[in-house]
Image (spheres, rainbow, N blue to C red):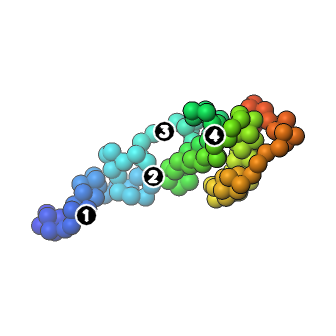
Amino acid sequence: AEERIASAPLAWQLRWEWLAGSETCCCGVARMTNHPACQPILDTEFNVLSVKVERIETKFIAKLHITVRVPFTKEVNVQGPPRDTKPEAIKDGMELGRRYVTEGEAGAKTVALRLKKKRWTQMETKDADEKKLSEFV
């Protein structure tokens, strides 16, 4: 077995080094001592949707962030277009959050593309409330 490992490509040799035994872990792969998916993780770190508005120089940008764990850990980041006013960015964030909750990552990315063309009117931005950015779920 040692000869086969030595003659294998480097990527396979590295993978072999990760495998630590014949038992399988929670992810169905042979138990690995440093495998992140096998380490205990607090549930509070996952599936927490966060939408924030950040100021970058003179513009405001809505940013959606969530770390999901199905079946592997995945981090989703979607950013709205730069806006001149904070209420416009808040409206972007509200749209990103709503779309993520109903359609997932693909929906949020689609709405982010559409928001680039969207111009919010003063009437539409009246109900922009930063507190609503944390009320999606």
Q: Look at 45% across and 55% down and name the residue there.
A: 27
Nearer the viewer's eye, disc 1 or disc 4? 4
- Residue beneath disc 3: 41
Instruction: Tell whether 12 sits left or right of 70.
Output: left
Q: Earlier in the sequence, mark 3 or mark 4?
A: 3
Tag shown at residue 12? 1
Q: Characterize the local packing of mark 3: few (<14), some (14-19) or many (20 or more) Cα atoms within 10 angstroms.
A: few
Q: Earlier in the sequence, mark 1 or mark 3?
A: 1
Tag shown at residue 26? 2
Q: Nearer the viewer, residue 67 or 33?
A: 67
- Find the distance from the CA under tag 1 to the CA under tag 4: 43 Å
Q: Characterize the local packing of mark 2: few (<14), some (14-19) or many (20 or more) Cα atoms within 10 angstroms.
A: few
Q: Are marks 2 and 4 in contact (CB under 8 Å)?
A: no
* Amino acid identity at mark 4: Ile
x, y (%) of residue 120? 79, 45
Q: Look at 60% across and 48% down and name the residue there.
A: 78
Q: Look at 26% across and 62% down and name the residue there.
A: 11
Tag shown at residue 61? 4
Quadrant in the picture for residue 48: top right
Q: Nearer the viewer, residue 115 or 97?
A: 115
- Find the distance from the CA under tag 2 to the CA under tag 4: 39 Å
- Mark 1: which secondary structure? helix
* Amino acid identity at mark 2: Cys
Q: Look at 83% across and 44% down and name the residue there.
A: 121
Q: Characterize the local packing of mark 1: few (<14), some (14-19) or many (20 or more) Cα atoms within 10 angstroms.
A: few
Position of the N terminus by quadrant: bottom left
Q: Nearer the viewer, residue 4 or 91?
A: 91
* Amino acid identity at mark 3: Ile
